[in-house]
Amino acid sequence: MRFGQVPVEEAVGALAAHSVRAGETVVKKGTLVTPEIAGRLKQAGVETLIAARFEPGDVAEDEAASRLAHALAGSNVVVEAPFTGRSNLYAETSGVLVIDADSIHGLNAVDEAMTAATLPAYKPVVAGEMIGTVKIIPYAIPEDLLEKGIARAGSGALRIAPYRRRHVGVVSTLLPGLKPSVVDKTLAALGRRLEPAQARIVQDCRVPHEAASLAEELALQAKGQADLIVVFGASAIADRRDVIPSAIEMAGGRVEHFGMPVDPGNLLLVGSIAGKPVIGAPGCARSPKENGFDWILHRLLADVPVTRADIMSLGVGGLLMEIVSRPQPRAGGESAGEE
C-alpha cells in the first residue's frame, strides 16, 4: 500500500487517510476519493491530500480483520462483521474463556499492522460478552503478511468452555463457637457464585470438624448426584495433614494441591474423590468479594482441568486486594481463617 501526501487530482481512486473539511465540503477518513470529490476539494482551495492507495496483493482492512478473527474463533465463539479494520469476537454461551496465549503472542509478534487483544484467560463470561478483538492498523496489508499472521494465530485460539457441572455438594465442618448464621451466609454466598453457571447446591451437610466424620460424609456425597464437592472448614487448612486433606484421603480420594499464590485465597485445596473434584475452600470464600476460590470454582464448573502447574502459575496478577485489618507488614499469628 502506498501512503503519503499527493496533489488532490492524483488522489482519485485512493482513500482519504484523514478527514478533511474545506468550506461546505467534508470528506471523512477512509472515503474513496472520486473525481467529483477531488473537484470539490480543489474548488475549496485544497491542493494536496494525504491518501492511501492499494497495490496488487493488498487485502483491505475489513477483510483482513475478519479472516484473522475467524482463525482465532474456536468453539462457542462468534465473530462480528468487521468495521474500520476491526472485528470483535463474542461468547456464544456462558462459560469460561480458554485462550491459547502462545497463539495470541505469536500473532501480535508478526507485524505491527496486525493486533489481537482478549479478556484475561479463564475469565467467566456470559453469552453475548465481547471476549476479544482484532484490529488491522493500516487501511490494507499484503496478502502474504496476512497469511503469516493467520499461520501464527493457528486455529481456534479462543474458545468458551461451557458450564457443565450443575450439581454442587457442600460439607461444612463445625466447632464450638461457630454460629449457624455464619454457615448460612456462606451457603448464600456460594449460591450467588453458582448462579452464572446455572448450578445449584444439591447436598448440604454439617459435621464436626474432625477427619473421621468429614471422611464419612465426603464418601457419601461422592456417591450422590453432586458433580463437585466444596468443603468449608470451621478452621482453615493449615497443613496437608490437617482435618480436610486427611478426610479426603480417608474417603478414598487424593489431594492434588494445597496452597495457591493468590491473595485472598492462599489456603485453597484441590482434590478429588471417585473422579469428582473437591475444593477445600479458603476462609475468604465465605465473603462475596472476588478471591482465588472464584477462579478455581468456575474452571471446575466448566470442566476445565485444574492442575498443580495451573495453580502455581497464578501468582502474577494473583494479588487481588489487601485486607485492611492485617498488620503492615503482616505479623506472625494472623488468623488462618482469612486466607
Image (cartoon, rainbow, N blue to C red):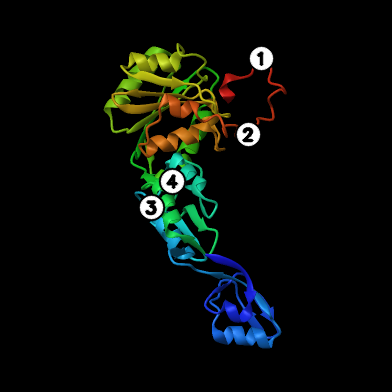
Q: The residue under label 3 is which amino acid type?
A: Ala
Between marks 1 and 3 in the image, the one whose residue lies nearer the viewer = 3
Q: Residue at left 52%, top 22%?
A: 267
What residue does disc 2 label? 321
Q: Residue at left 51%, top 43%?
A: 120
Label 1 – label 3 distance at C-alpha: 52 Å
- Badge 3 marks a residue whose secondary structure is helix
What residue does disc 4 label? 196
What residue does disc 1 label? 332
Label 1 – label 4 distance at C-alpha: 38 Å
Q: Nearer the viewer, residue 319 or 33?
A: 33
What residue does disc 3 label? 71
Q: Earlier in the sequence, mark 2 or mark 1?
A: 2
Label 2 – label 4 distance at C-alpha: 23 Å
Q: The residue under label 1 is which amino acid type?
A: Gly
Q: Are marks 2 and 4 in contact (CB under 8 Å)?
A: no
Q: The residue under label 2 is which amino acid type?
A: Met
Q: The residue under label 4 is which amino acid type?
A: Pro
Label 4 – label 3 distance at C-alpha: 28 Å
